[in-house]
Image (spheres, coloured by chain):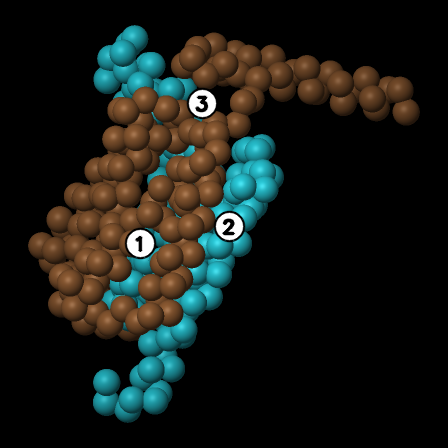
Chain colours: A cyan, B brown
Amino acid sequence: MKEVSTSLHVASLYTWGSIVAMTFASVVGDVMLARAMKQVGDVHVLWRREGLLRVVARTLGNPNFFLGVTAMAVAFFSLLFALSWGDVSLVGPAAASLTFIGNAFAAKIFLREKVDRRRWIATVLVAGGVALLAR
Amino acid sequence: MTFRKYLVLAGVTVFAAAGDSMLSHGMKQLGNISLHHLPDVVLAILNPWVAVGILLLLAFFAAYMNALSWADLTYVLPATSLGYVLLALIAKFVLHEQVSASRWLGIALISGGVGFVAGGPALTPHSQAKESGGAKDSLSADRETSRGARTRVSNGVGS
C-alpha cells in the first residue's frame, strides 16, 4: 500500500472482478456436477450394493462430471486470485452467495428443481446478506 | 434424511470453511498477485497453508458430490453457506481480520436463508425413483426423453 487511494481502487476492482468470474464459473460447475451426480444415483445405495470402487468409477466415467470439474477449477483459481486481494470474510461469502442466487435460477431452468417460495425467500435473505457484506 | 446424510452435510460445511480459511492464510503470506504475474497463482500451491487448504477442499468436494447424489442443488448449497458463520468466527479469532457489525448482520441473514431451505424437502421428486440408484435411472430418463420427443413430433404434425 504505497499510494493508498489508487491501490484501494485497484484492489476492489480486482477483488470484485475475480468474484464475478468465480460466480459464473461455479454456477456452470455446480449445475454440471449436480446433473452428473443425479445420473450416477444415490451414492449411499450404490455403495452398499456395489462397493466404493463402483461409485468412484461411475462418477469419474460421467462426462458431465469432467465439465463440472473443469468449470470448478476455473472458479478455484479465481478464488485464489480474489483471496490475495480481499478479506476471506468478504470474498468467501460474497462469491458463494452470488453463486447461490445464480444457482437458484440455474437449478430451476436447467435441472428442473422445484424452487418453491421457501427457497426463493432463502435466496432473497442471502441476497440481503451479500449487500451488507459488500460494504 | 438419515443420520449419515446429516453427517455428510456437516462435512460439506466444515471442510469448506476450514479449507477456505487455510487458503486465505496462505495467500496473505504470499501477498497480492497482480494481473501481470498471473502464473504466480499456480505457484501458490507450493505454500504449505495453500496445500493443506486444497486437501481440505478435496474432502469438501467428496462430501459435496455425495450430497448432490441424493439431494437438490438448491438444498445442498445452503449447507455450504452455514460455513460462513464458522468462517467469520475463524476470520476473527484465528486470522484476526476485522468482522464489522454489518458483516455479522449479513452473515445472520445468510444463516436465516439456510434455515428456510433446511425446513423443506431435500429432493424434488422427478420421474426417476430415488431408490433405484443408477442403471434404472438413466433408463427411465431415456424413456422420458423419447416420450417427450414423440409428443413434440405429434404436436408438430397436429398443428
Question: Residue A61's quadrant in the figure?
Answer: top left
State the image coordinates of residue A55 (x, y, percent, origin top left): 30, 19
- At label 3, the amino acid type is Gln
Nearest to the eye among marks 3 and 1: give it.
1
Residue B15, image x, y percentages: 22, 43
Q: Report the number of numbered marks.
A: 3
Task: Give the residue type that dot 2 points to.
Answer: Thr
Cα distance in 3D space between marks 2 and 1: 15 Å
**Left or right of B24: which side holds A95?**
right
Mark 3 lies on residue? A39
A116 versus B42 height, above or below: above
Secondary structure under the numbered disc 1 in the rendered image: helix
Are circles 2 and 1 on residues that touch, CB within 8 Å? Answer: no
Q: Are marks 3 and 1 in contact (CB under 8 Å)?
A: no
* Marker disc for residue A123: 2
Q: Chain of mark 2?
A: A
Q: Is residue B37 above or below residue B54?
A: below
Residue shown at 30% from the left, 8% from the top: A49
Badge nearest the viewer, 2 or 3: 2
Quadrant location of residue B126?
A: top right
Please, what secondary structure does the residue beneath circle 2 have? helix
Is residue B7 in view from this perspective? yes
Question: B106 or A66: nearer the eye?
Answer: B106
> Is B126 located above or below residue A125 in the figure?
above
Q: Chain of mark 3?
A: A
Which residue is tagged 1? B84
Depth check, front residue: B116 or B43: B116
